[in-house]
Amino acid sequence: SDLLAAAKNVRAPLPDVMIVPRNRLLLWFAVVVLPFSLLGAVEPAAAGISLAAIGGLLVLALADAAGCRATLAGISLQLPEVARMSKDREAKLEVRIRNEHWRPKNLRLALALPREIESPQEDAWVALPRDSEWSRLTWPCLPRKRGNYQLESAYLEADSPLGFWGARREVPVRSDLRVYPDLFTERRS
């Protein structure tokens, strides 16, 4: 995995993390910035207090954004090298999540399944437990067309330390999805 260092003493650079604002940031913006900017505009004597409140929120939001890069550090995914499925029959894909730091964390997970393999869920919320390195999740899917498909990426999302931002990252995975004809249905015919 690209998250693991090649040697114990060498640290790999953190992969690209995209941050997106959460509702909590928008709420605090509405609670702090809008009223204090109005107060500062209406009452010039309160301009200093207004600037301090707005600046305080800005500093908190920027500090939270800076801490957001490390939110997904140490999280990696493992899928089976080969997953065999039958066309038009429900299957389950086993996803193993590695939490190197053994800290509890809530993650949002999405798999980039090929178009020919449907899933009733677009994403899943996963609660990683404390004091456990590995967690397991089964992902339901329904193959609609025979063939050999590659699953090469998954997407993770987690909240920043203060919850103002969401950290999103693409995680490379490698799984060969093989869809065979449904012999059970063909035998009945």
Image: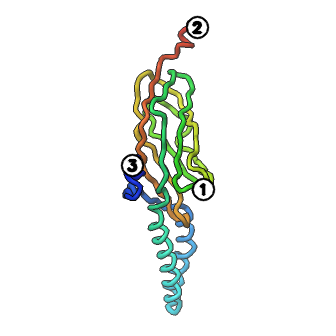
What residue is pinned by disc 1? 104
Residue 100: give x, y in percent of width and height: 51, 53
Q: Secondary structure at mark 1?
A: loop
Residue 66: give x, y in percent of width and height: 44, 67
* Residue at 53% from the left image edge and 66% from the top image edge: 25
Q: Mark 1 and mark 3 in contact? Answer it, CB < 8 Å.
A: no
Task: Give the answer, above or below, for where 180 lies relative to 177.
Answer: above
Residue 143: give x, y in percent of width and height: 49, 26
- Tell me the distance, in whole angstroms, between the alpha carbons under discs 3 and 2: 47 Å
Task: Give the answer, above or below, for where 155 lies relative to 105.
Answer: above
181 vs 41, nearest the viewer: 181
Q: Residues within 10 Å of mark 2 (few under 14, many from 20)?
A: few
Taking the image as drawn, is residue 144 in sight? yes
What residue is pinned by disc 3? 2
What residue is pinned by disc 2? 188
Task: Indicate which disc, 3 or 2, sits on the residue closer to the N terminus.
Answer: 3
- Specify the amino acid type for callout 3: Asp
Q: Nearer the viewer, mark 3 or mark 2?
A: 3
Q: Secondary structure at mark 3?
A: loop
29 vs 40, nearest the viewer: 29
